[in-house]
Image: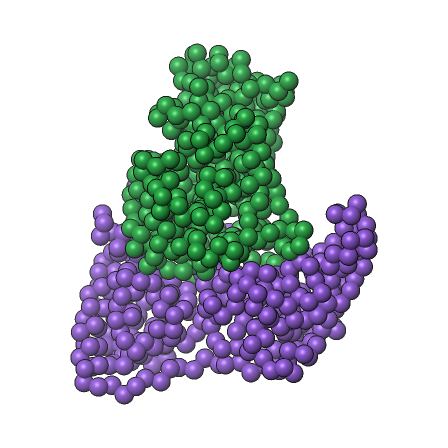
Amino acid sequence: MARKKEKLIPSKYIPDVGSSIETVEGQDYLIVNDAMYTFYRRSRGEFSAFFLALRDEKKLLGCSCTACGLVRVPPFLTHCPECNFASTELIEVEQVGVMNSTPPITYFATALFQDMAPYGRGRVIFRGADTAMSVNLYTTTGILVPGIISKGTEVKLVFRDKRNGDVKDVFCVPTSELTPDQINKKGLLESEIDWESPVEPKMPKAMKKDVALFEKVFKGIKTIVEEMNRNERARKDIVGWKRNVLVKTRGGQFAVMIDDGDIRVEKKGVRSPDFVMVCENPNTLLDGLAYRGAITDSVINKKLWISKNMEFTTIFKLDRMARSVARSRKG
Amino acid sequence: MAKRVGIVGAAVTPFRSSWTEKTYYELAQMATREAVKDAQIPIQDVDAAFYAIYNDIFERTAIPEHAIHGLCGMQNKFGIRITTGGATGAYTMSAAHAYLAAGRYKTALVLGVEKATDCFDFSSMSATPEVIKSIGWSGDSFFEQAIGWSASDSYAEVVLGYMDEHPGDLKPEITAAISAQLSQQVRDNPYAQRQFDQVTAEEVLNSRLVAYPFRELEICVYSEGAAALILAEEETAKAISRSSGQPVVWITGLGESNEHSFAGKNHKDMRRIMSDYHASHGAYEMAGIQDPTHSIDIIELHDAFVHQLEITMAEFGLVPLGRADALIEEGLMTPGGRYLVNPCGGLIYCGHAVGASNIMSAWSARNELIKRGLKTALVHGTGSTVAQYTACLIFEHE
């Protein structure tokens, strides 16, 4: 059941030994690449039974207080503090539950979870439990957006095919997206679900007016991008960043090239783009770059499609640049 | 009987997104130098030090206060560090008050300092993902860290729990209006990270979603900086005040509360921030405040998120639960309204140098009470997962 051999810290996160100089008001300051790291061989202690049940038996355990009967899932204690520390006993609970409250959705993730964003994390009260367990939440229909899962939504616990004995071994999806057999199955695996894979949206055939709109909007985009390129604050937002992006709209396509502080747009294709953006109406992107609404929100609202979720990082940087220009305009 | 304790000196360093020019050693000393100067006493007259430093990872050392003790002139004296997440500064003031009230010491330095943006994510070539990752180590290490716990998503859980219960409250146009108002108030704070970043409500609504339901301009910004107070017991405080010519601002009420970190029956109620309720009402009781809506003039509230600011004001009893939007709709906190909320711009615009933030809020509350000739202020700190920790203090200016 162990995952394929992988490093605890993926090499992409590990910087090279190095240093640099940063000058502030004519004075040089030494900046040194550094890290503080500690490795663990850490016992799961009293939680071992819970994690082993997830990993090996695809069971969900809780603990029941022998005095008050309160069932806590996960079983995060061995004695109940409400009952003068009466002992608790492990019990199995059902793998269907309801959301305790509407879950947040993280778009701008920490450095550790950028591969996973956007993701939902919320608390589920499984049948037979009195407390809520924190889990990741997914939809089988693509990117999780507000409104799909909310307080009271019934969800099903799903097990990863490869499990390591930790809380990442499981997640939940709405039961409304599953068949009755899947809902009733104990130990449902992720591979037993049909996941809608991201497919590039098909663009309707371009009409004359679409091409005219594209030509007009592209001029606007080019003007804003040139302003970004002249703006010190905006340039700082993309220091060290390099991306070639192909943007497809109904009336035409163009390339956005980001290269360590520089940003350019050109009406041309890109042979191997880092990712593709698709928006039927080019004004969607123009508005975002002009700080008339976030590009992030356009992705969430499905007005703009990106080929890799990971590239939310680039989208954030473009949003950031739009704000930087807007701030500079105010003086 | 407990002694009265008051503030006789206060100072902050500028809060900045990055202090390339200074380490946290120097930031700590800067704030200390200015605080004793404000009190017009030598550091030798300070008996004990209470350090507010949130996160070992930010300072890149596990006992970050050990070096600053000597650097701040406290050699061979009492020194203790408090760390309680975002509420670190407020809890540190509470601890210092307890020692002085008990008569252990006559004077104390309360010093908050924090670095943050030394943390750097080399994969995105920016600081913020690494800063919030460092804070992410504060989540439950068995059940939550691995599935993406973050400060934003854990506070969002509570906000969404409240919105489930009160679907008509915390309207986007109101949270945006509050953020815009705070951005105006920060103009008068020369130490703020975003002193000249005035935004409109429309710009707030147009800023990107970071973690649903929070937008970028509704979230506090991470800062580096320091803040310090000099506290003294009653007789010493009066003597210092006579010498400095500055009035004493008394700490007349304190309350603290930490909720359960797990949710469900008999555990954390996600619809409420009970820690805010218990801590504020405990502070009112100690200060003899019967009706806070009449007594409180200034609120320096730890606004990690605008939505949480609104809920916290309701938990304080200053606006009804479920009607927090009245803060704007009924003008309760708009200019000239009943409450002056975060005149410093709050943590959203002044900045959040975590250990120093609540002490900066105290510095602001003390200044505003004296400057405006008002009587009572409430200072607040919130922290940990799901807004679990709160400490509140009541300041009174005679």
Question: Which chain appears purple?
Answer: A
Q: Vertical placement of A189 versus B391: above or below?
A: below
Question: Which chain appears green?
Answer: B
Name the side, left or right, on which B259 lies relative to B321.
Answer: right
Percent across and percent down for residue B115 are 47, 43
Percent across and percent down for residue A116 are 51, 67
Scheme by which the image is coloured: by chain
Name the side, left or right, on which B130 lies relative to A182.
Answer: left
Residue nearest the viewer, comparing A151 with B3: A151
Name the residue rendered at 68%, 67% in the picture: A127
Q: How many marks?
A: 0
Name the residue rendered at 55%, 63% in the picture: A151
Name the residue rendered at 54%, 26% in the picture: B287
Name the side, left or right, on which A25 lies relative to B324.
Answer: left
Whether residue B61 appears in this view of the structure is no
Q: Residue furthest bottom?
A: A205
Name the residue rendered at 39%, 36% in the picture: B339
Percent across and percent down for residue B90 are 53, 35
Percent across and percent down for residue B349 are 37, 44
Q: Vertical placement of A242 versus B71: above or below?
A: below
Q: Vertical placement of A28 versus A140: above or below?
A: above
Quarter of the image containing the N terminus of chain A?
bottom right
Q: Vertical placement of A211 versus B298: above or below?
A: below
Whether residue B299 appears in this view of the structure is yes
